């Protein structure tokens, strides 16, 4: 009898634990949806003057800011390989194993802010691989002072399986702002220029990709499904007394 009771309690652990994990995923999904909504509203907000306080900047990722100044094209950095942000193409190719997107690079250029007296890093946008060499796109190398609107981006840590940055070859796989700042002499402040910054022959702006993984619904279904299935088996064996379960 004691053995049967022990088995009864032991087998109840699985459905109870699965139910708890499913409930936890419900809360996580709610949090993630709120975060996505917050980021979307932040991206669409009116641009504000770029602050230089690191603490303030840390709270402004994905927020549009405005600056005025000049580019220093002699110190371009290249984040590669990259594909161009194209929502229409991405929607057409959703679910496909392969993509028709052309690979290339993001051109990151030091930008001296005339009003702030500092130099920051600006992702001017995407160029195809054949246009990475600046000699092939001289028409797009803006020399005059310009007004820019861009989205604040923070530094990144290298994710598993992402190659290390190679400053010697000027190949950057992720945003290491401290390293980029050392190479260029700029401040570790980084913005993605918006699409309106695009000029003929230059990089295509607007390359901010706002994505957050939201797979919580799948986890909810999995955990609640497991809880329901194991609860059914537990009831069948210990309540209904069905043998062989």
Image (cartoon, rainbow, N blue to C red):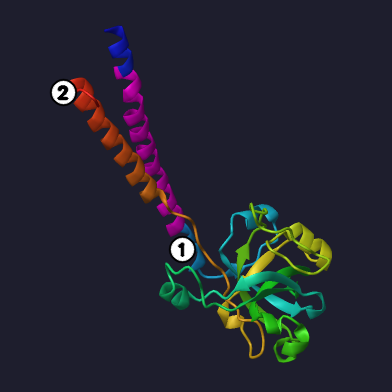
> Mark 2 or mark 1, which is nearer the start of the sequence?
1
- Identify the magenta region: 8-37
Q: Give 181 or 22, whichever is nearer the viewer.
A: 22
Instruction: Name the residue located 78 percent from the left edge and 69 percent from the top edge.
Output: 170
Q: Name the residue tied to disc 2.
A: 240
- Residue 82 as seen in the image, left or right of residue 1: right
- Residue 237 as seen in the image, left or right of residue 148: left
Q: Name the residue tied to disc 1.
A: 40
Q: Give 100 or 74, whichever is nearer the viewer.
A: 100
Q: Residues within 10 Å of mark 1 (few under 14, many from 20)?
A: some
* CB under 8 Å between discs 1 and 2: no
Instruction: Indicate yes or no whether the magenta region holds residue 34.
Output: yes
Q: Nearer the viewer, mark 1 or mark 2?
A: 2
Image coords of residue 124 (percent x, y): 66, 76
Dot 2 falls on a residue whose secondary structure is loop
Q: Quadrant of the C terminus?
A: top left
Quadrant in the rendering for residue 24: top left
Instruction: Name the residue located 44 percent from the left edge and 69 percent from the top edge.
Output: 96
Q: CA distance from mark 1 to mark 2?
A: 52 Å
Q: Is residue 95 visible?
A: yes
Instruction: Indicate yes or no whether the magenta region holds residue 164.
Output: no
Image coords of residue 197 (percent x, y): 61, 81
Instruction: Name the residue located 46 percent from the left edge and 63 percent from the top edge.
Output: 40
Q: Is residue 30 visible?
A: no
Q: Residue furthest left?
A: 240
Instruction: Name the residue located 66 percent from the left edge and 56 percent from the top edge.
Output: 156
């Amino acid at each position: 009898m004691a053995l049967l009771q022990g088995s009864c309690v032991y087998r109840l652990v699985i459905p109870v634990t699965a139910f708890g994990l499913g409930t936890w995923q419900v809360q996580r999904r709610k949090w993630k949806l709120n975060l996505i909504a917050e980021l979307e509203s932040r991206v669409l907000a009116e641009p504000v003057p770029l602050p230089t306080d690191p603490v303030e900047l840390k709270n402004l990722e994905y927020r549009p800011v405005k600056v005025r100044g000049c580019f220093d094209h002699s110190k371009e950095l290249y984040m590669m390989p990259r594909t161009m942000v194209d929502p229409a193409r991405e929607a057409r190719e959703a679910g496909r194993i392969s993509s028709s997107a052309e690979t290339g690079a993001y051109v990151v250029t030091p930008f001296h802010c005339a009003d702030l007296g500092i130099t920051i890093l600006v992702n001017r946008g995407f160029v195809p691989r054949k246009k990475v060499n600046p000699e092939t796109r001289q028409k797009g190398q803006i020399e005059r002072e310009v007004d820019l609107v861009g989205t604040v981006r923070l530094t990144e840590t290298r994710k598993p399986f992402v190659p290390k940055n190679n400053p010697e070859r000027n190949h950057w796989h992720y945003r290491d702002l401290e390293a980029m700042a050392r190479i260029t002499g700029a401040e570790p402040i980084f913005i993605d220029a918006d699409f309106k910054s695009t000029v003929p022959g230059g990089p295509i702006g607007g390359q901010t990709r706002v994505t957050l993984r939201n797979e919580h619904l799948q986890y909810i279904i999995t955990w609640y499904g497991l809880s329901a299935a194991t609860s059914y088996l537990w009831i069948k064996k210990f309540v209904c007394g069905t043998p062989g379960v």
